Image (cartoon, rainbow, N blue to C red):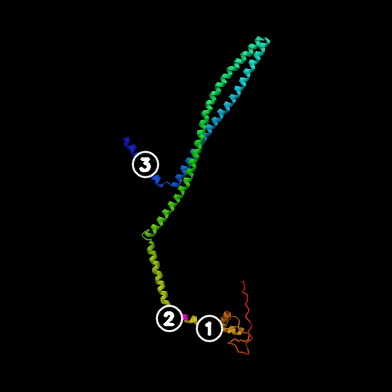
Amino acid sequence: MFEGLKRRFKYYNARSQQRFEAKADPTVQLEQAIAEAHDQHRRLKEQAASLIAQQKQTELQLNRKMGELEKVSGNARQALMMADEANRAGDQARMLEYTNAAEAFAGRLVSVEREIDDLKALHFQASQAADQAKAAVAQNATALQAKLVERQKLLGQLDQARMQEQINQAMTSLQETVGQDVPTFDEVRAKIEARYAKAKGVAELGDSAVEGRMMEIEQASMHAEAQGRLDEIRQQLGLPAADAASGALGTGAAPSGELDAGTPADAAPQAEPTQQVPSDPT
């Protein structure tokens, strides 16, 4: 019974995990992975800093012990010199005191030397650990930078995939019927083409009808009347006719003795050479 429940629990757990992975946003998951990589790099840097601090601490202790060793060694030599001077002076009591002091300094000297040896070994180990930690931090920083570059590449690929999926969906919707009341693109195009063809046909029939011809005749009459009115205004102003003006523009100004054909010879003023009037810039 217990085995069956356990197996069922694992099955439902795997099924829910599969559904979650199918619906999860890859962008969010990618950011989670990058955030975890940053946290791992931060923890690694903290461990490396701790090892480097231990190395610095043992180095300071070693330097302090080296100074103490030099001081104790100097005191031992000084005690021996003072004992020798007391011996020469015949003061046996002071010589004995200085000798005992020198022996005490010598014992302290041996103890300090042992401590220095231990500190040297500890400092060596701490230095190796610190160097390894520095190398690990540098290697992890390179890996993290590679992951950041890979993240940009993956985000670009994800955007391209989403755009391609939208394009595929749009192309599919143009070819397939979306719903029962929604026409396809081909059906709409056929309806528009049929409507356009019908309108063109009606327009052609309208152009060939009598009403269309009558309208063209009316427009031509209005155009001829307007041209005649313009000729009258030109005569009143003493300007050449439309045909003469166009010829003058093409061949140059008429001779001074030539008169306008549309005006009497005694009433027409003598034509002056045509001058080029600058055009209004406005």
Q: In terms of depth relative to the viewer, which is nearer, 127 or 213?
A: 127
In this image, 211 relative to 94: left or right? Answer: left
Q: Could you tell me which secondary element the residue under label 1 belongs to?
A: helix
Q: Visible in this render: residue 41?
A: no
Q: Could you tell me which secondary element the residue under label 2 belongs to?
A: helix
Identify whether 173 is placed above or below 193: above
Residue 39 on the magenta span:
no
**Residue 114: % across, % down:** 55, 21
Question: Which residue carries the number 2 mark?
Answer: 210
Question: Which residue carries the number 1 mark?
Answer: 225
**Residue 223: % across, % down:** 52, 81
Q: In the image, which is nearer the foreground, mark 1 or mark 2?
A: 1
Residue type beneath disc 2 = Val
Q: Of all residues shown, which one is farthest toward the right?
A: 89
Q: Main secondary structure of the magenta part?
A: helix
Q: Could you tell me which secondary element the residue under label 3 belongs to?
A: helix
Question: Crowding at label 3, few (<14), some or many (≥20) Cα neighbours within 10 Å?
Answer: few
Image quarter hosting the C terminus? bottom right
Gap between marks 2 and 3, in whole Å?
A: 83 Å
Image quarter hosting the N terminus? top left
